[in-house]
Image (cartoon, coloured by chain):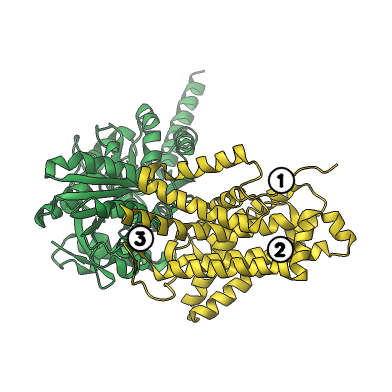
């Protein structure tokens, strides 16, 4: 039984770190603009699909990954410039609907480019499972975990230690005040979209060897990443990471200990419970109005 | 007065003849409703391409008994409600002569009541056995049933002397129907089920379920599913170091599955239509020329062939043969002719329909395949 439990935990943490990476992207854009970007899952899909296409065209994996990430960042910037920016004065809800439209558009483009088939990326370093006590883990899962930790730390350092990062955070606290002290809010928004697109693309490339990718792979990942961001308190990047890990572990434990049929139900029940008792998420800052 | 009566008679006779002439040249209308978009699009897409390709070919050769075929198609997107309204439209406003379609069992079963009420020949391209059992007067189907797949797997397990099986299935219609048939047939073949796990078709990791299976003491694992999930299951099995024999269903009998699962797919067995291994069949096999002809034609235009497109080919073949034997597009006559299909060689096997069997395939139509060096190989 302890062996089994260890395997469930390993599974949960692997799946959870995927959710965490996607959730992180949600949190960044929400921070900069109060908008939930529903095209975040599509960034993940685009990263994976572009990398696969470039690899099939004969490019080495590392180069393919770098170009795919850059291209996705470009898509993120274009999305911001041509879809979000023109609607600058619009309400948050309108902007969210624009992102939903963008998501559908990106899925359509991917469908035209790559068809409906699933595609796989070869694992970065072999497929021989690594034994961890009684549990086994794939080298690719270690890649996912390692890069997630590195990216999370980088984002954290960026937000807390650099002027640019602090400026981005300032926009999330009070946009008008940020503008008043001379922060270029527009540029910050672009930065947030570019960064989220890049994070999403990297997540997609990392997980493509494990989960495969297709034009609609972003839908499910987007949904889970969004749940992770909500559980962690949307707008709190580190909260999103914690939320993702929690969600992944809960799913694995649910599938293993209760019933595989109820695994998603258990995870979403947890999300509902969190929203019920902690509407701002487990790690969200309380939105108390100061008088 | 008398003269004008004659004139009227003459004109109406001429008119009647004219109408009849026009009717003879009228196209035969085949209505189809397939899932060309949505989650089951990998089934419906090759089906539609196949239908369009062969309708074009038949028309180029002069049609059926001098009448061209007109294909009227609607995309259901996998929504059974849409399937029902499209079928109503096909029957009532497009006035089609027969129906080929219903990519999924859900779409098919949803339209059966209307088909039976209106009385129109209907050839379904969906898998589940419930479409033809109990027999419905107007409904036929071309793909193998999931019960045949279960029987084929169990026969092989018995040959290998294995009886304790662990089952893992997805949450789609195909998966659930397959699970039902496996549970139903297991006692008949002396199989005991030691684990019965499930997963969501869009899940990205099934190691938790498989770890439970590993602990359950099974002798073989059966996975019934579609799309990418069975490939993930296959990879997860390897990851957990499970070395039990693994069986997949005919739902993943394509090169894509091997590509996705990679090395982990080695040694996996599954029942599949002969189309997948057309080249490997002995030259004496009567199916071989039919399979190769379809494969060559499809691949020249659309890329790798799949068994699903083959189901549409079989459906159209059966329909055209029946139209020719019936000598007209009269619905009752065509239905009777379809029911009398005998020895017709399609991609799924040799069809021998009877009033009791509206599919007409037997278990031999399935080949048992094994993945060997990244390709399918026939095991018998």
Name the residue rendered at 44%, 32% in the picture.
Answer: B16
Q: Is residue A149 above or below residue A31?
A: below
Q: Position of residue B281 (x, y in %)?
A: 18, 66
Residue under numbered circle 3: B231
Q: Secondary structure at mark 3?
A: helix
Q: Secondary structure at mark 1?
A: loop
Q: Nearer the viewer, residue B22 or B32?
A: B32
Does residue A281 appear left or right of residue A289 in this picture?
Answer: left
Q: Nearer the viewer, residue B187 or B347?
A: B187
- Distance from the alpha carbon under mark 3 to that under mark 2: 35 Å
Q: Nearer the viewer, residue B322 or A249?
A: A249
Q: Nearer the viewer, residue A263 or A50?
A: A263
Q: Secondary structure at mark 2?
A: helix
| Farthest right residue in view | A180
Q: Is residue B308 above or below residue A149?
A: above
- Distance from the alpha carbon under mark 1 to that under mark 2: 23 Å
Dot in front, 3 or 1: 1
Q: Position of residue A117 (x, y in %)?
A: 44, 61
Dot in front, 3 or 2: 2
Does residue B207 appear left or right of residue A223 in this picture?
Answer: left
Q: Are marks 1 and 2 on the same chain?
A: yes
Residue under numbered circle 2: A192
Chain ID, green in image: B
Q: Are marks 3 and 1 on the same chain?
A: no
Residue under numbered circle 1: A286
- Mark 2, other Cα within 10 Å: few <14 / some 14–19 / many ≥20: many
């Amino acid at each position: 039984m302890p062996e089994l439990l260890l395997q469930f935990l390993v599974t949960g943490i692997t799946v959870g770190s995927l959710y965490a990476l996607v959730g992180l992207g949600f949190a960044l854009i929400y921070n900069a603009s109060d908008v939930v970007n529903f095209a975040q899952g599509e960034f993940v899909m685009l990263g994976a699909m572009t990398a696969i296409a470039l690899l099939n065209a004969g490019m080495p994996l590392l180069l393919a990954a770098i170009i795919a990430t850059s291209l996705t960042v470009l898509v993120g910037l274009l999305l911001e410039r041509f879809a979000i920016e023109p609607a600058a004065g619009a309400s948050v809800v309108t902007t969210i609907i624009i992102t939903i439209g963008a998501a559908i558009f990106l899925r359509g483009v991917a469908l035209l480019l790559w068809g409906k088939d699933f595609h796989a990326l070869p694992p970065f370093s072999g497929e021989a499972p690594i034994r961890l006590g009684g549990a086994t883990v794939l080298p690719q899962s270690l890649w996912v975990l390692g890069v997630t930790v590195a990216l999370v730390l980088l984002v954290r350092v960026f937000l807390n230690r650099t002027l640019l990062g602090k400026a981005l955070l300032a926009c999330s606290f009070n946009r008008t005040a940020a503008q008043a002290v001379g922060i270029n809010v527009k540029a910050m928004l672009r930065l947030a979209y570019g960064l989220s697109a890049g994070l999403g693309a990297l997540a997609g490339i990392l997980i493509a060897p494990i989960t495969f990718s297709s034009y609609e792979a972003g839908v499910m990942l987007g949904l889970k990443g969004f749940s992770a961001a909500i559980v962690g308190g949307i707008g709190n990047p580190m909260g999103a990471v914690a939320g993702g890990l929690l969600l992944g572990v809960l799913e694995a434990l649910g599938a293993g200990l209760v019933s595989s049929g109820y695994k998603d139900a258990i995870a979403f029940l947890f999300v509902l419970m969190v929203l019920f008792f902690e509407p701002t998420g487990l790690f969200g800052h309380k939105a108390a109005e100061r008088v | 007065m008398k003269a004008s009566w004659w004139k009227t008679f003459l004109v109406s006779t001429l008119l009647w003849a004219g109408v009849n002439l026009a009717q003879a040249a009228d196209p035969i209308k085949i209505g189809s409703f397939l899932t060309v978009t949505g989650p089951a699009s990998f089934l419906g897409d090759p089906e539609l391409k196949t239908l369009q390709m062969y309708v074009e070919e038949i028309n180029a050769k002069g049609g059926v008994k001098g009448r061209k075929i007109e294909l009227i198609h609607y995309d259901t997107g996998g929504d059974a409600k849409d399937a029902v309204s499209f079928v109503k439209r096909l029957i009532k406003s497009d006035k089609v002569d027969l129906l080929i379609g219903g990519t999924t069992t859900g779409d098919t079963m949803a339209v059966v009541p209307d088909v039976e009420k209106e009385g129109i020949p209907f050839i379904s391209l969906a898998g589940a056995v419930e479409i033809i059992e109990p027999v419905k007067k107007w409904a036929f189907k071309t793909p193998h049933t999931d019960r045949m797949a279960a029987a084929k797997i169990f026969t092989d397990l018995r040959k290998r002397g294995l009886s304790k099986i662990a089952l893992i299935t997805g949450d789609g219609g195909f998966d659930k129907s397959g699970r039902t048939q496996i549970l139903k047939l297991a006692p008949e073949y002396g199989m005991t089920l030691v684990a019965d796990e499930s997963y969501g078709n869009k899940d990205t990791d099934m190691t938790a379920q498989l770890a439970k299976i590993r602990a359950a003491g099974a002798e073989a694992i059966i996975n019934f599913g579609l799309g990418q999930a069975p490939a993930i299951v296959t990879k997860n099995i390897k990851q957990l170091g499970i070395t039990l024999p693994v069986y997949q269903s005919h739902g993943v009998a394509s090169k894509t599955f091997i590509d996705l699962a990679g090395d982990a797919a080695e040694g996996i067995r599954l029942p599949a239509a002969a189309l997948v291994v057309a080249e490997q069949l002995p030259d004496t096999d009567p199916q071989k020329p039919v399979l190769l002809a379809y494969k060559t034609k499809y691949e020249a235009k659309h890329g790798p062939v799949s068994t699903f497109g083959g189901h549409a080919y079989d459906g159209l073949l059966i329909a055209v043969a029946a139209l020719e034997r019936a000598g007209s597009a009269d619905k009752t006559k065509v239905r009777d002719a379809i029911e009398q299909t005998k020895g017709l060689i399609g991609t799924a096997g040799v069809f021998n329909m009877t009033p009791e069997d509206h599919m007409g395939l037997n278990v031999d139509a399935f080949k048992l395949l094994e993945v060997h060096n990244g390709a399918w190989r026939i095991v018998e």
